[in-house]
Image: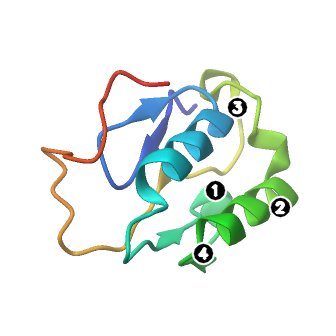
Amino acid sequence: MASSWSCGLCLFACLLLSQMLSHIRQVHSGDEDFQITCGISNCEKSYNKFDSFNRHVKNRHHVFLEIPATDINDVDISTALQFPKEQIDQETCSSCTLTGY
């Protein structure tokens, strides 16, 4: 069972996928080198524009949008959205706060 959705670019975590999408849009989507791999249910689709990624999640993974991560059972799901950036420093995040939304 998943306990939270985790941002692959910083230490932010939340209970709802919709909150994670909001976080990514507000904090990371403006990055010049923005790139994200979905990771939901082992989905390997990658995007370099937030709007395309957001549309993909809403069309293909909409069932997860408002279900708290703690309630997701028996589903093959990767809770860490992946950002393939070599320079990611998991210890610090200068782009956001970790207090949540």
Q: Which amino acid, by three-letter code, is at mark 2?
A: Arg
Q: Which mark is residue 44?
A: 4
Q: Position of residue 58 (x, y in %)?
A: 81, 54
The one of 29 and 87 positioned closer to us in this rendering? 29
Callout count: 4
Q: CA distance from mark 1 to mark 2?
A: 10 Å
Q: Relative to residue 7, is residue 51 depicted above or below?
A: below
> Residue at left 15%, top 56%?
89
CB contact under 8 Å: marks 1 and 2: yes
Earlier in the chain: of badge 4 and badge 2, it is 4
Q: Relative to residue 61, is residue 47 depicted above or below?
A: below
Q: Which amino acid, by three-letter code, is at mark 4?
A: Glu
Q: CA distance from mark 3 to mark 4?
A: 21 Å
Q: Position of residue 16 (x, y in %)?
A: 63, 30
Earlier in the chain: of badge 1 and badge 2, it is 1
- Of circles 3 and 4, the one toward us is 4
Earlier in the chain: of badge 3 and badge 4, it is 4
The kind of secondary structure element at disc 2 is: helix
Question: Pointer 1: what residue?
Answer: 40
Question: Pointer 3: what residue?
Answer: 73
Q: Position of residue 83 (x, y in %)?
A: 40, 66
Q: Which amino acid, by three-letter code, is at mark 1?
A: Ile
> Residue at left 84%, top 42%?
63
Q: Position of residue 62 (x, y in %)?
A: 83, 48
Q: CA distance from mark 3 to mark 1?
A: 14 Å
CB contact under 8 Å: marks 3 and 1: no
CB contact under 8 Å: marks 1 and 4: no
Position of residue 19 in the picture relative to residue 7 (left or right) = right
Earlier in the chain: of badge 3 and badge 2, it is 2
- Of circles 3 and 2, the one toward us is 2
Question: Pointer 2: what residue?
Answer: 60
Q: Callout 2 environment at 10 Å: few (<14), some (14 to 19), or many (20+)? A: few
